[in-house]
Image (cartoon, rainbow, N blue to C red):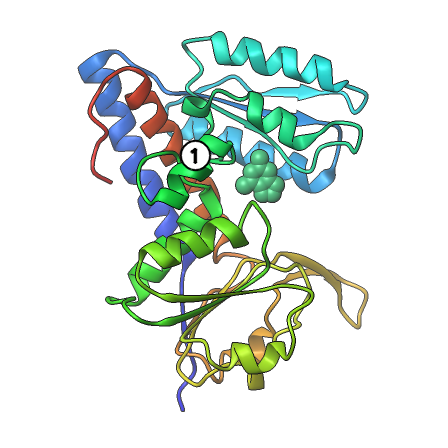
Amino acid sequence: MSKARLIDGKEIAAKLRKTVAAQTLTLRNSYGLVPGLAAVLVGEDPASQIYIRNKETHAREMGMNNFSRKLSKNTSEAELLKIVSKLNANPEVNGILVQQPLPTFIDAFTVIENVDPAKDVDGFHSFNLGALLRGSGGLVPCTPKGCMMLLETTLSDLNGANAVVLGRSNIVGKPLAQLLLAANTTVTITHSHTRDLPEICRNADILISAIGQPELIKGHWIKPGAIVLDVGINRKKTKDGKQILVGDVDFDEAIEIASAITPVPGGVGPMTIACLLENTLIACCQQNGVPVPEI
Ligand code: GUN
């Protein structure tokens, strides 16, 4: 059997960003509107600092306004809620995201529920999650949305496919399962209590992992010809002491069995930011009563 095709998230994300940049320019020229994004970081988590910097850089590249805030690790929940409330009230800010994880003394649910749902470009507010469950309207969480775009570029018809999602987080697993369901796949969600995980995975036409366990998924877990999306980004030390990034899937084994697979890095990751920018553009249009462009 030939090796799996690489699903190039970098290239697909770059195309999406190009479209979003063009639509942003049209919005400015036709309506004098400039989408504004506020990414809020509390503390100094190194991975979160990199994610926030990337979000800011790409938003600027889109021609969007940047209202990002970097807050000290001692910021209280009350202080954070006050900042969120100010961003909610600012008409120039169309999208707000509060980077997770938050310090343990801040309740993430309280913060998410205090973001105006119309500006909730992460799609984490219960209003948007409710819309997702219903199957219409609302802002869609970015990583799951990016996964669906990658699948749609890889497989022309998802109808009836067996999709297995590893992980039941609110950020990826649960919303992704809803999108897969809406796309007429038959969905199985697995988690840390699931029995005989390899056997369930072997039944997957589409296997998507978001569990954060380096290279757990081996080649013999994968159905020959399956499509594999790897959301995991894990640090691993090589034998010569170098730090590298690996996914949840043992890539070298999986590439021999699957028909298509995302690399780590350069697979799902770039799609998350591109979808965040798309959500910011959509939010800006909706808040200003302007038609949302076809993307
Ligand atoms: N932490 C990891 N992924 C995400 C994301 O998509 N949004 C936010 N706000 N925090 C995250």
262 lies above or below 16: below
Q: Please, what secondary structure does the residue beneath circle 1 have?
A: helix
Find residue 135 and report its image quarter: top left
Residue 194 x, y percent position in the rendering: 64, 70
Q: Name which residue type carries label 1.
A: Asn
Callout 1: CB less than 8 Å from ligand 1? no
250 lies above or below 79: below
46 lies above or below 160: above
Query: Is residue 262 something one can see in this rendering?
Result: yes
Q: Quadrant of the C terminus?
A: top left
Find residue 157 and report its image quarter: bottom left
Give neighbour class at mark 1: few <14, some 14-19, many 20+ (Cα, 10 Å): many
170 relative to 240 in the view: left or right: left
Residue 42 x, y percent position in the rendering: 70, 26
Towards the viewer: 234 or 104? 104
116 lies above or below 153: above
Query: Is residue 218 something one can see in this rendering?
Result: no
- Ligand 1's quadrant: top right
Towards the viewer: 249 or 131? 131
On the image, numbered disc 1 is attached to which residue? Answer: 128
284 relative to 10 in the view: left or right: left
Instruction: Residue at 48% x, 8% y: name it.
Output: 89
